Image (cartoon, coloured by chain):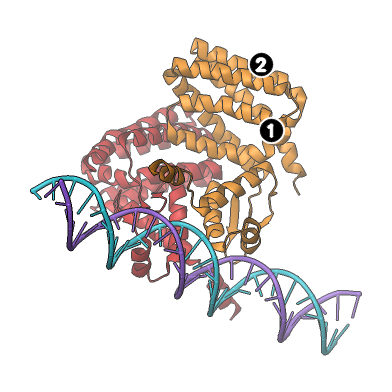
Chain colours: A orange, B red, C cyan, D purple
Amino acid sequence: MTENLTLQMDDYLPLRDVVFNTLREAILKGELKPGERLMEMHLATKLGVSRTPIREAIRMLEQEGLAVTIPRKGAQVAKMTEKDLQDVLEVRDALDALAVVCACERMTDAQFVELKEAMKAFENATHTDDVRKIVETDEAFHDVIYAAAANPKLENIINSAREQMYRYRYEYVKNPSVYAQLIAEHRAIIEGFNRRDVEYLKSIMHTHLSNQINAVRVVIREQV
Amino acid sequence: MTENLTLQMDDYLPLRDVVFNTLREAILKGELKPGERLMEMHLATKLGVSRTPIREAIRMLEQEGLAVTIPRKGAQVAKMTEKDLQDVLEVRDALDALAVVCACERMTDAQFVELKEAMKAFENATHTDDVRKIVETDEAFHDVIYAAAANPKLENIINSAREQMYRYRYEYVKNPSVYAQLIAEHRAIIEGFNRRDVEYLKSIMHTHLSNQINAVRVVIREQV
DNA sequence: TTTATTAAGATTGAATACAAAATACACGCA
DNA sequence: TGCGTGTATTTTGTATTCAATCTTAATAAA
């Protein structure tokens, strides 16, 4: 009886959070395209809720950088210019460097095992055609590193930066010719942690990130 | 006539933004203390608005890390633990380093002049007892650097990190014995930009930041 | 006295209602 | 045809209302 209640409590989420997650996912997957208007009434009827939770969810998306709203004109999915992308990458580069420094110091043995498993999962995924799965296992690999850094604030900020590129990054991963390189880089990262070689790790992370730049840049240029 | 209309347009702000700014200021100034409950009805009557804009402002504060809400229980001003502070400082350290690297490359002559003026303003402020002014001119000095980095995304993230420490930092600046050191560090920063000496700048920024740690830590310990 | 119990009040969550502004569109005019 | 102008419609901003949950406090039982 009580456990039933607890269960209800556990999976209870305010509608605003449900809406937020739904819209967030839709934006990241590209179902809602950059520049697309987020009309409250439209979303409300589509999701079967009132405007109230929609509005609150939009405020949240706004602060995440996924939506932009102009007073009295409404919200739209955030667009990124090439400059925006460059700026975000610059920041991520610095934060990635910090993350590997921290992770190098603080990674537990269990986490190192986890990292190697995440590596395998990614490698397996690249043998399929499931782009979604490839992206997810790649993200998961990096998640292990960020978690090992043991700095939740850092993790939050990196995630927010990742999120902003996510939409564009999809295109990069769709191209199978990059898999070999990605795998090699992941292997190098593991090797780096094995040797606890901070400088080596920093440089790998840097190339790993900058490889994405050009690909993403092309996608952004295509965005009218 | 038309200019009057434009003016009205310009200073129009949705209530949610007015409320957001008001609450944000109140939190940063310490008028709303960490852990204090943010009750919608209470704030609404106090500010003379309905609960709707209050709720939206709270969602915004939440994403800024200034408020925390537990579903069905309401929001409260975010508390920071020592660990939280350490985490934020670690991140800010990395971002400050990035900022000076960028600023070193990109700072215009006009901005360098601005920086020297901000320095003077800060120095003058330290000769008064106006703690508020001292904090503001100090912030302004750093704002010039962050602006010179010419990376708005970086600026946003740094500002959000600064904001989270701001409340606690006040106490540090209240102590006049640190002024001399602060001035010396600011002078060193200017000297660093003059020489475009990135490594020197990084190290100054690092000590500049870490000097704050212990002071802030004391304040946090006092927070029950 | 302390601990359950439970009812009243307070508070949040969500929907609805109303006001103000922006947008779209049809009409008239040059 | 092209361009304003004004009206109708849509959309956002804010307030109000109703429902669900949480908190508090008073009461009763051990």
Question: What x and y, as percent, mark residue A135?
Answer: 66, 30
Label 1 sits on a secondary structure element that is: helix
Q: Is residue B155 left or right of residue A1?
A: right
Dots 1 and 2: beta carbons under 8 Å? no
The residue labelled by disc 1 is A132
Residue A184, label in figure: 2
Question: What x and y, as percent, mark residue A125?
Answer: 68, 23
Q: Is residue A36 above or below residue B18?
A: above
Residue visible at 36% across and 36% down? B84
Which numbered disc, 1 or 2, marks the residue closer to the eye?
1
Tell me, yes or no, if residue B121 can be seen here.
no
Quadrant location of the C terminus of chain B? top left
Q: Is residue D15 above or below residue D28?
A: below
Question: What x and y, as percent, mark residue A197?
Answer: 50, 13
Please name whichever residue, A204 or B19, is drawn nearer the observer in this view of the structure.
B19
Question: What x and y, as percent, mark residue B125?
Answer: 30, 51
Which amino acid type is marked by label 2? Answer: Ala
Q: How many labels, in total?
A: 2
Q: Is residue B197 above or below residue C27?
A: above
Q: Is residue B158 left or right of residue B126?
A: right
Same chain shared by disc 1 and disc 2? yes
Please name whichever residue, A202 or B38, is drawn nearer the observer in this view of the structure.
B38
Which amino acid type is marked by label 1? Answer: Arg
Residue visible at 69% across and 54% down? A36
Dot 2: within a 10 Å radius of its alpha carbon, few (fewer than 14), some, or many (20 or more) residues?
few
Between disc 1 and disc 2, whose residue precedes? 1
Q: CA gap, disc 1 to disc 2? A: 20 Å
Report in which chain the residue with disc 2 lies. A
Residue visible at 43% across and 52% down? B61
Report in which chain the residue with disc 1 lies. A
Quadrant location of the N terminus of chain B? bottom right
Tell me, yes or no, if residue A176 can be seen here.
yes
